[in-house]
Each structure stands twice: as structure tokens, then as C-alpha cells.
Image (cartoon, rainbow, N blue to C red):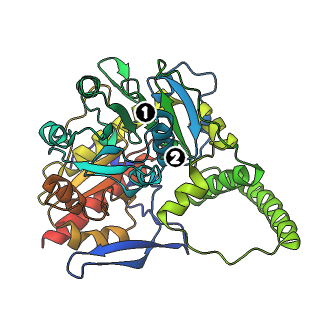
Amino acid sequence: MATTVRQNKAKGRSIRPPEGVLYSRTTFSLEEGVRHPRKIPLPAAPAFPVLSKQGLAGRGQKPYPSVLVAGKVVPVASGRAAIGLALQHAGIGPGHQVLVPAYHCREMITPVLAAESQPVFYKIQKDFAPDWDDIAQKTGPATKALLVVHYFGFPQKADEIQAFCRENRLIFIEDCAHAFFGSYRDRPLGSYGHYAIASTRKFFPIQEGGALIIARDRAAPKPDLTAPDLKQNLRQLKTGIEKAVSYGRLPALKPLLSMIESIQQWRKDKSEALAPSAPDQPPDEMAVYLERHRQRGMAKIARMIVDRTPMEKAAGLRRRNYRILLEGVSGLSGCRAALPELPQGCVPYLFPLVIDDLEQIFPAFEDAAIPMQRFGQFLWDGVDETICPVSMFYSQQTVQIACHQSLTEDELLWIVTAVRRLIKRGKQ
């Protein structure tokens, strides 16, 4: 197997998940028709960027094509919060309809419902582009906005979407949750829509955060958000350091973890002495959005990390890693890259891989601790093949492999080797 990774460097090396740690994942059985939790190991390599000395060397860097130069930037708590604030800023609310893709994550839909608007699901095509015939058919007097996703960092034809929205008097919400970096026709992604939304935690070593980008010609004032307090900043910092240390990065920061834990425990003891807290209850999707995200800004520590990340280097590594994964699965029977070309201006978020027998193979991927996601695995209730067969296909047959800038060459080679082994085993 030819690859640009130096194979001899990792030959015989075993990469394992952080010891003694499991997490619960909700999976879905097609045969049983039910969702159920199962314990699986944490990924053996980080699924998202993690803190490192090299990854924070970008102070004073030159501007790089990203959503940060696409318009007026409002740092927020999450991508879903950015969607909600975009709707609020545009005056979209009760009685209005918002066109959203049938291939989505559930967090995209929650803000629409919280605005008391109706999500109307439109079809996508096999190349993830919007199905314009379906969109035209579903656009009516109550339709006020169109949300389009740059899936996995691959640019949509944003100028055509912009023209359609102008012609139909729709608000164009450019979903850049998968496309913090990148450009289309020499303009940064996020600069075409009336609003763009981004998810910083997908591209930077922070635990939560996002951005709302407002077009410069939108006159309304920016949303007034609550600044995260010391507790929220400490939690972000502690979790980031914990993840970095667990994956062999920044071992010298272990003492700092102890100091942060002491501060957190002191604050907890003081709080409980004043008013004992009620038992924790698992919040539902709407509660998380309303209580933790909607009107809260990004933590200061997260903004500092974003500012210090060398963006051009991170983008280049993501493109390199995508090519390595693409080459690694080339010619492998039983799977194929959903997006086999890496166009100029594209900075990938993940590597989407279509697997013929995914539902049978996926538990083995989980148990092998592959760093991955299943974007769109759980579509909104009622979205099925009658709404969009392509979306259902990608929901059931696609897994997305990590290709972020924090992955080492050893980890990339391990991922390629593990994926090939599991798919070959599944074909036997």
C-alpha cells in the first residue's frame, strides 16, 4: 500500500485508547428499530484537535481565508447557538418556514423550533449539493430562510445559492460548521450568506464554541450575549489539558490540572455550603440549547486558543491528512470515498467514507477505537426515504474519519491500517 506517511516510523507500534476510560454512545439498530446505549472505548487517536505547543504558535499571524474575515464576527457558545441568533437577528419567528437539508445533525433543527418556526426539509444530491427542483417546489409565502451546508468542508456553489435567495427574497444562512477555513471563487466561505455560522470546536483544540458571522451590509446591532464566567473558562481549560495529556501531548501541564481541580473543588464546596445543588438530570436537546447555548458568548480562554492557532499550517495539515486517508482506502473493496476529489480552496473537516455493510461493520470500528463520527446518523423524526433517499443513504452508509491537524503520522498510519483491516474482515 503506497502512502505519503513514513511507514517505517510506526511499524509495529500499537496505538491504544486512554487507559481505563469508556464512554457511552447511543447506537441505532435497523433490525430492532430502537436506540440503545453501549460502552465503547475512547478513540485511540484524538477525534478532534488537542492542545500542543506547536498548535499554539500562531500569535501575530497573517489573516488566512476563514469565516473570521468573512463579515462581522460574534463569538458564541456553539454552532447551534449561531443558527438561533441568525434567525433572531433576521426577525424569523412564529409562522415562518426555514428550508434545511434533509441530511443534517439534530442540533441544526433545535434552534429553528426554538424560534417557533417550521423546518422544511429539502433533498440533497449525491454530491451533497442542494436539489434545486425540490427547494423551488417547497419555497412558498411563509418561507423566510434557506440554510445550506458546506458538508465536510467542501464548498457549495455559494454564488448560485446567493442568487437564488436574492431572487426569492430569502435569508441565506451559510452553514460553515464543517468549513471554518476555505474559500470559493477567491472569497472566504461565510462571505456569501446574509449570515454564516461556524463551530470552532471542530477546528481548534477547545471544547465548545462557535461564531455567528453577519454580513457587513446587515444594519441591525450585534446580539447582546452573556460572557462566560470563571467556572466556564476553567472547565474549558481543564478539559482541554486533560485531553491533550491523555493523548501524550503537553505532559508538563499535569501539575496545572491539579491546581485547576483544587480551584473547582473550592468553588463547588463554597456553592454547596450556600445552597445544596439538586441531583443532576440529563437535559434534552432543547434544554441544552436554551439553557447553555442560546444567549452565551464564547469563553475567553477559547478565544485566546483560536487566536494563537497557526491557521495556515492547520489548514495545510488537514489537506495533507485527507489525501493520506484517500490514498489509504484507494482500491479497497467494500468502501469508497464519498468525496474523492480535494478541490482548491477546500479545507476538510472530516474524511467521509461510504461503507457497503456499515451497520454490520460499525460496532467493530467503535471497539477498535477509530477516531470518527457519524454525521446525520440520527435524522429528525419523520425524515425518511420519502423525504430524501440520498440523505437516508448517507445516514446509514457513511462514517467520517478524523483528518484534523493534531494527528501525528503514526496515528494516521494506524487509522489507515485499522480501517483496511476491519473492512477486509467484514467482507469475509
Pick the residue in front: 153 or 80: 80
Q: Indicate the position of residue 115 as horizontal and vertical percent values.
A: 46, 49
Residue 10: tell me if it is visible.
Answer: yes
**Callout 2 secondary element:** helix
* Horizontal arrangement in the rendering, residue 247 relative to residue 421 (left or right): right
In the image, taking residue 381 as reference, residue 404 lies left or right, namely: right
Looking at the picture, does residue 145 appear above or below residue 234?
above
- The circle drawn on residue 81 is 2
Q: Residue at the spot x=44%, y=44% of the render?
A: 93
Vertical side of 55 occupied by 398: above or below: below
Q: Where is mark 1, residue-wise?
A: 196
How much space separates mark 2 and mark 1, taking CA atoms?
A: 12 Å
Name the residue located 39 percent from the left edge and 50 percent from the top edge: 108
Q: Position of residue 255 (x, y in %)?
A: 77, 57
Against 290, residue 205 (above or below) is above
Residue 254 versus residue 353: which sits nearer the camera? 353
Amino acid type, callout 2: Ala
